[in-house]
Amino acid sequence: MPLGATLHTGDMSMADIVRYAQRAEALGMEGMWLLEESGKEAFATLGVLAGATARIRLGTIIVSYFTRTPTLLAMAARTVDELTGGGRFTLGIGAGGRGFIERGHGISGERSLRRAEE
């Protein structure tokens, strides 16, 4: 069964995140997925990891569809997928935590399903 890792990266240095991904790849893990709630922007971090790894799948567990437009999400996903050489990126989206959305971004978390449909 394939194994992967999920990171809350806010308290890790970028060098530590890169080392973690490289070690996960060396151990034969399937993938590494990031969250944004803890202080680092996921797509920029995945772009760094794309250049530091060769095989491991990279992706987002949840990036909020409240904090980015559908077009911006598509552009970010395409960019990271291209940086991986194609085929190693997986996009996971969701509403995100209500506190993250409302307190962190000042956006109402209401009508989550309607926003997802957009």
Image (spheres, grey):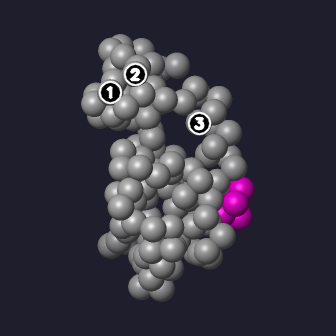
Give the magenta range. 82-86
For marks 2 and 3 on the same chain, the one whose residue lies earlier in the sequence:
3
Marks 3 and 2: in contact by CB < 8 Å? Answer: no
User: For the residues carrying marks 3 and 1, which lies nearer the camera in this image?
Assistant: 1
Residues at marks 2 and 3, CA–CA distance in whole angstroms: 19 Å
Can you identify the residue that label 2 sits on? 106
The residue nearer to you, when weighing 95 against 14, is 14
Residues at marks 1 and 2, CA–CA distance in whole angstroms: 5 Å
Q: Amino acid at mark 3?
A: Leu
Q: Left or right: 17 with respect to 6?
A: right
Can you identify the residue that label 1 sits on? 103
Locate residue 91, reporting x and y percent: 51, 47
Residue count near mark 1 (Cα–Cα under 10 Å), binned few <14, some 14–19, many ≥20? few
Q: Dot 3: what SS?
A: helix
Which residue is at 61% across, 45% downward? Answer: 77
Q: Is residue 87 visible?
A: no
- Quadrant of the rendered image containing residue 68: top right
User: For the residues carrying marks 2 and 3, which lies nearer the camera in this image?
Assistant: 2
Can you identify the residue that label 3 sits on? 73
Which residue is at 52% across, 61% downward? Answer: 58
Q: Left or right: 67 with respect to 108?
A: right
Question: Which quadrant: the N terminus?
Answer: bottom left
Q: Amino acid at mark 2?
A: Gly
